[in-house]
Image: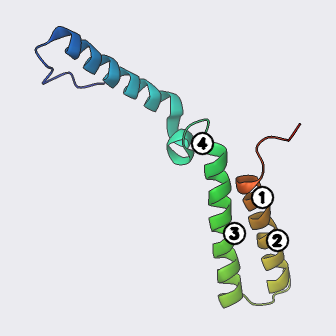
Amino acid sequence: MADFTGLPKNTELAKHVIDAQTATESAKLERGVLGWLFGTKSGAPFNVAALTVVVGLVTICATASFGTDGAGFGRKEIIAVALNLVTLSLGYLFGRSQSKD
């Protein structure tokens, strides 16, 4: 709930303050938990792609530093998969947004 204490004495200005606080609270409720984590509708795809790049780079560094070749995936396979995710995400982030006509 918005806090309406300390409003200005001017009624028009107080109305604008109340409207702004109500809009802020409404936007917070609309975004929800995932919106808090990834951002608004327009910025979320870029934030998810950037998070994928960071996680991929951390995975590559950790695997190169501490990874061992086990019975399942080896170091090379893990690094190859993580590198594919990183390059795919970078292509999404820096690729053309519109095609030329």
The span from disc 3 to disc 4 (Cα, nearest Å) is 20 Å
The span from disc 2 to disc 1 (Cα, nearest Å) is 15 Å
> Which residue lies under the disc numbered 3?
56
The span from disc 4 to disc 1 (Cα, nearest Å) is 16 Å
Q: Residue at x 28, y 16 (%)?
A: 16
Q: Secondary structure at mark 3?
A: helix
Where residue 37 appears, as percent x and y from the top left, is 53, 47
The span from disc 2 to disc 3 (Cα, nearest Å) is 9 Å
Crowding at dot 1, Cα within 10 Å, few <14 / some 14-19 / many 20+, comes out as few
Query: Circles 2 and 4: CB distance less than 8 Å?
Result: no
Where residue 74 appears, as percent x and y from the top left, is 83, 84
Q: Residue at x 79, y 40 (%)?
A: 98
Crowding at dot 2, Cα within 10 Å, few <14 / some 14-19 / many 20+, comes out as few
Outermost residue toward the front in this view: 101
> Which residue lies under the disc numbered 1?
91
Q: Quadrant of the C terminus?
A: top right
The span from disc 2 to disc 4 (Cα, nearest Å) is 26 Å
